[in-house]
Amino acid sequence: MNDFWIRNATLVSPTGRRNADIRVIDESIAEVADRGNAPAGVDDHVDATGLWLLPGGVDVHTHFGMPLRRGLASRGWLESSTAALLGGTTTVVDFANPDRDEPIPDAVARWQAAASQECLCDYALHATVSAVDDERLDELAELIEGGIPTFKGFLAYKGRLMLEPEELRLLMTRVHQLKGRLLLHAEDGELNARCEEELRQAGRTEPRHHPLAHPAESEIAATATALDLARATGCPLTIVHLSTAGSLALIDAARTDGVDVSAEVCIQHLFRTDAWYERGIDEALNAVMSPPLRSDADAEALRTAVADGRLDWLATDHCEFPLEIKRSAAVDGFPAVPNGAAGVGERLIVAFTLGVESGLISPERWVDLCCEAPAAAMGLGHCKGRIAPGMDADLVLFDPRASDTHLPVHGTHSLWTGSEWQGAVRHVWVRGHQVVESGQLDPEAPTGRFIRRFF
């Protein structure tokens, strides 16, 4: 049985910083005491002098081992969850994507089976809905009863995942009836398809042309459509990986009208811009993602909204494909390149360096964006994202004074290599089990568990 103290820590939470001693019993936090109030003479303890104690990071938008087509999937559960733990993230929410005509519960079972074998962090699932008919809609209640209350719809990816507005209205109506929440990839699939075909016809298919197939107007139009449907149906809505100032303005206005809408932003859309596509072919390939990197003005608007609280949490849309796979696919043009980028292992340190150290946000806001807010919004607030008695003992000891930090990235190229990073994840616990010690993964780290979520 675990029974130990973390002593002399500076506990950082959204409400402030305090000097504290933390007791862990079994898998839970048993006590949070002011520093020096822990019983004397306890031998089993960790000295956290000079370190910040954070709740384990919660990334509610990942794609681990996501099958794209036969023989091709993003980096798997073991590799991706290893990066997550080394970067201080202890819980992820991934997306179960059904094949064509596959029942959604069957897809969820496939995802759970894969994760249960290899995922080292705790995990939950969203369910993607890519077809709207009575059979699929009837499956949603079963999923909610099983602890999956969030569903993803797409206005993007014509011919694959895209829903027509009327289909999206039917989906939102049912999700609202069941007291779930809809997550939306807001891009106009028709507009994107036209732009991509025009680029093909013009022979402009190098990776640097990828963002031209996903113009800002596409996200803005799809966001407007989704918000109109949220007004009409009353369905709680989350716009995932928001990337444009125009979409943000629409969300601001909708909230004023009383629409229940939240907005997620990813680290790449805050701290990288479309100038990345002109840095070279490998850099452009690393930035082939949807939505793509946007303008300086868009990124600045999003950073302002992060600082003032209008953007709700910080995620990654982690979907990493090795660079050599992207290079091989690029011979057929950017439309053939698998979309996605790494981020789950980099998020805490990137946001600390470019957010906290730059003066954009406070340490307290950083913890809220990366831990408490996403957990609370996605139905994990009963066990994740906070340091309080009764919560899971998911804990991170972070060194804010460390410099020249090496991020837990694969290979030599990513959006986050080649910079001087500040801060370091020293120790990590998942439900009281130490999985990272002095920045090194425990080779005997146990697999994580599936977390059921309820609103």
Image: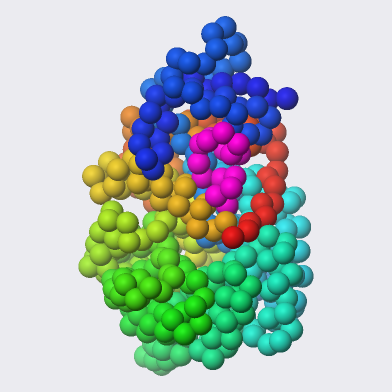
Give the number of marks: 0
Q: Residue at x 46, y 79 (%)?
A: 230
Classified by dominant secondary structure, the portion drawn in magenta counts as loop
Q: Residue at x 63, y 73 (%)?
A: 178
Determine whether, in the image, residue 87 is placed left or right of residue 212.
right
- Indicate the quadrant where residue 102 lies: bottom right
Image quarter where the N terminus lies is top right
Determine whether, in the image, residue 367 is placed left or right of residue 320.
left
Q: Is residue 409 a member of the stretch shown in magenta?
A: no
> Observer-nearest residue: 319 or 455?
455
Image quarter where the C terminus lies is bottom right
- Indicate the quadrant where residue 74 lies: bottom right
Q: Position of residue 317 (x, y in %)?
A: 49, 61
Q: Is residue 361 above or below residue 277?
A: above
Q: Position of residue 148 (x, y in %)?
A: 66, 63
Q: Is residue 409 visible?
A: no
> Observer-nearest residue: 371 or 156?
371
* Magenta region, residue range: 380-395
Q: Residue at x 37, y 40 (%)?
A: 15
Q: Is residue 74 above or below residue 138?
A: above
Q: Position of residue 277 (x, y in %)?
A: 33, 68
Q: Is residue 394 a member of the stretch shown in magenta?
A: yes
> Observer-nearest residue: 9 or 78?
9
Q: Position of residue 433 (x, y in %)?
A: 65, 32
Determine whether, in the image, residue 81 is placed left or right of residue 139.
left
